[in-house]
Amino acid sequence: MRLPIVCPQCMKDDVGSAHPFTTMEWQDEGRYEIACPKGHTAVTILQEQKFELLFDIGAYALIDGYYREAVSSFTSSLERFYEFFITAAFLEKGIDAALFSKTWKLISNQSERQLGAFILVYLAELHKTPMLLSQKSIEFRNAVVHKGTIPSRERAIEYGQEILDQVRPAFRQAKERCPKGVRAAIFQHMMQSRRTPGEVSGTMTTPTIISLSRDDKSYNERTLDDALKELRRWT
């Protein structure tokens, strides 16, 4: 997985002539240190959340024929979405970000507790039960992740589509119900990517299949199969 990099100083000097000059592998912390051909050095922070990137990693795994890895990445994307939704809901209510992070660590290593927290927070915010994975998909996921089952491409796509169908309406509702919380969660992510307080850095965004930054309906209603056909590779 590689990300096209544009120099933020070149963009500031002349946005019309600034173009990607290199690609870099996606980093877990979303931080990219660059030195462009014109001699500028900068730090660029990727705005996308972990759940957005993990879903795309799963999609590229599908394209490359690694179907077990695709199922694992889709699963991780869903779990990280639960965390994002909960974070946004609490930050919307004015809960201190540091206090929330400290409290989240009490359940951060236990996926069942995170799922339970998501269900209850969703109910409290939207007064209805969230859409969850079907029992069939839960059994499929467990067989792949824990028992070494090798899935077919068709079944892996079906699983990814079910996660898309669950996450997309939930993140739209998060943006509508908790707009300040969503912005605060994104800002918190970018602050955590800085290594020193006050570090000068730029930000960037990249198109992902699940995208907080894209509001156009046609983009967000594409099937996983259609999205796979449109993925662009950077080499």
Image (spheres, helix red, strand yellow):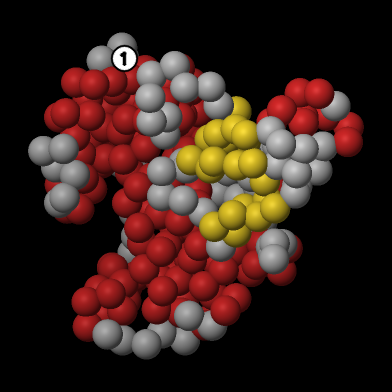
Q: Position of residue 199 (x, y in %)?
A: 47, 22
**Image point 35% across, 58% down: which residue?**
76
Q: Amino acid at mark 1?
A: Lys
Up the image or down, 154 lies above or below 17; here it is below
Relative to residue 4, is residue 180 drawn left or right? left
Q: Residue furthest top?
A: 94
Residue 5 visible in image = yes
Mark 1 neighbour density, 10 Å: few (under 14) some (14–19) many (20 or more) = few
Q: Circle 1 — which element?
A: loop
Residue 168 visible in image = no
Relative to residue 93, is residue 9 drawn left or right? right
Q: Residue furthest right?
A: 16
**Image point 55% across, 34% down: which residue?**
43
Q: Which of the image's four quarters has the C terminus?
A: bottom right
Residue where numbered disc 1 is placed: 93
Towards the viewer: 151 or 8: 8
**Image point 59% across, 54% down: which residue?**
24
Q: Position of residue 31 (x, y in %)?
A: 48, 40
Up the image or down, 230 lies above or below 15; here it is below
Q: Which of the image's four quarters has the N terminus?
A: bottom right
**Image point 41% across, 43% down: which residue?**
29
Q: Residue furthest front?
A: 39
Tell me where residue 75 sits by quadrant. bottom left
Towards the viewer: 22 or 120: 22
Q: Position of residue 123 (x, y in %)?
A: 28, 33
Q: Position of residue 89 (x, y in %)?
A: 34, 25
Relative to residue 14, is residue 81 drawn left or right? left
Towards the viewer: 96 or 161: 96
Up the image or down, 78 lies above or below 182; here it is below
